[in-house]
Image: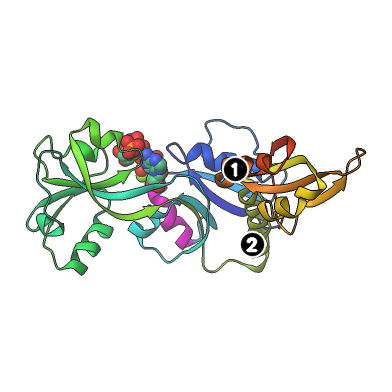
Amino acid sequence: MEKLKIAIQKSGRLSEKSLELLNECGIKLSNGDRKLRTEAKNFPMEILFLRDDDIPQYVEQGVADIGILGENEVWEKDKDVTIIEKLGFGSCRLSLAIPKDEEYTGLDYFEGKRIATSYPRILSKFFGVKGINVKIEEISGSVEIATGIGLADGIFDIVSTGSTLLMNGLKEVEVLVKSEAVLIANKNLSREKTELLEKLLFRIKAYKNGQGRKYILLNAPNEALPKIIELLPGMHSPSILPLADKGWSSVHSVINDDDFWEVIDELKMVGAEGILIIPIEKMIR
Ligand SMILES: Nc1ncnc2c1ncn2[C@@H]1O[C@H](COP(=O)(O)OP(=O)(O)OP(=O)(O)O)[C@@H](O)[C@H]1O
Ligand SMILES: O=P(O)(O)OC[C@H]1O[C@H](OP(=O)(O)OP(=O)(O)O)[C@H](O)[C@@H]1O
Ligand SMILES: [Mg+2]
């Protein structure tokens, strides 16, 4: 039987989350801590641990069938691969930053300036479209010190909390793109491998659907039910079960984390009580 070969980052920002995702999909890896290649015990899958920069090329060539990496690297490497699914972790943005005491006058500020980055292709495309001439200094890491050591006038790099910029006396002046971890795939997978990918994708989606949602249970007087059904539409509609205490019901539904506190207040106002919120592990729509 064919095995689906997946490339994930060996060590770095996405390594742990990539392994966690496989684990949440019920895929158990064979032990072998320092190995660069391992197999799954209960799924026809081989796992390759690589530098994230190399993953697009390996997936394009078919050395790996699929891979997990930041969208930013996919854009930068510009290889012929398909982005299959956003994975909901590794969120960051690619931004232009300049020394904090400089006055920023808009994109024209960068005309004739030197910009240090590990993403030269994305950056040159951007300024090419804008018709602004910049000199790109390509460096592979520690980009934020480039202005301090006189290598560049500005930088273009990954920003998440902004603390690295702050620590290096820089300010973010333009956000060019937002990125998160994605699953990519080779464009010519065999039928057998495509079926394995679909199986994996089904599990990934079930896990992602559960993320950011909670199961909610509560008791309410029957006259409050129409309002509660409106507040908690759930996946299809909430389940309503009669309580032994006449005139009362138990309501079960699903709620988004983001709506949670506002809805709770309204539920209490209409008389809900004994509200329980329970994490959801997986959710199949
Ligand atoms: N601070 C951050 N917050 C969130 N996501 C980030 C952050 N920094 C990087 N990422 C995402 O994680 C990916 C990997 O980042 P990391 O810093 O581990 O890369 P790297 O140093 O190039 O690793 P490698 O050794 O594999 O080449 C980035 O391409 C980006 O998509
Ligand atoms: O806005 P922040 O939350 O400070 O995150 C941004 C920093 O995170 C990443 O580096 P990382 O810490 O992964 O180290 P690296 O440069 O060795 O990849 C990125 O290259 C930025 O430097
Ligand atoms: Mg890298």
| Residue 9 tag number | none
- 187 shown above or below 183: below
Is 55 inside the magenta-drawn segment?
A: yes
Q: Residue at x 72, y 40 (%)?
A: 271
Q: Is residue 153 left or right of residue 168?
A: left
Locate residue 79: give its quadrant.
bottom left
Secondary structure of the residue carrying numbered label 2: helix
Residue identified by numbered label 1: 260
Q: Is residue 120 left or right of residue 25?
A: left
Range of magenta residues = 51-61
Tell me: is circle 2 under 8 Å from ligand 1.
Answer: no
Query: Relative to the observer, which residue lies in front, 248 or 132?
Result: 248
Q: Colour scheme used in the picture? A: rainbow
Q: Is residue 70 left or right of residue 211?
A: left
Task: Give the amino acid type for the residue marked by disc 2 in the picture.
Answer: Lys
Could you tell me residue 193's position as x and y percent? 64, 62
Q: CA distance from mark 1 to mark 2?
A: 40 Å
Query: Relative to the observer, which residue lies in front, 17 or 195?
Result: 17
Report the mark closest to the observer, 1 or 2.
1
Q: Quadrant of ligand 2?
A: top left
| Residue 193 tag number | 2
Query: Relative to the observer, which residue lies in front, 64 or 87?
Result: 87
Which quarter of the image is occupied by the C terminus? bottom right
Could you tell me residue 177's position as x and y percent? 33, 56
Secondary structure of the residue carrying numbered label 1: helix
Task: Give the amino acid type for the residue marked by disc 1 in the picture.
Answer: Phe
- 108 shown above or below 171: below
Q: Residue at x 63, y 64 (%)?
A: 194
Which quarter of the image is occupied by the N terminus? bottom right
Magenta stretch, main secondary structure, is helix
Locate residue 37: give its quadrant.
top right
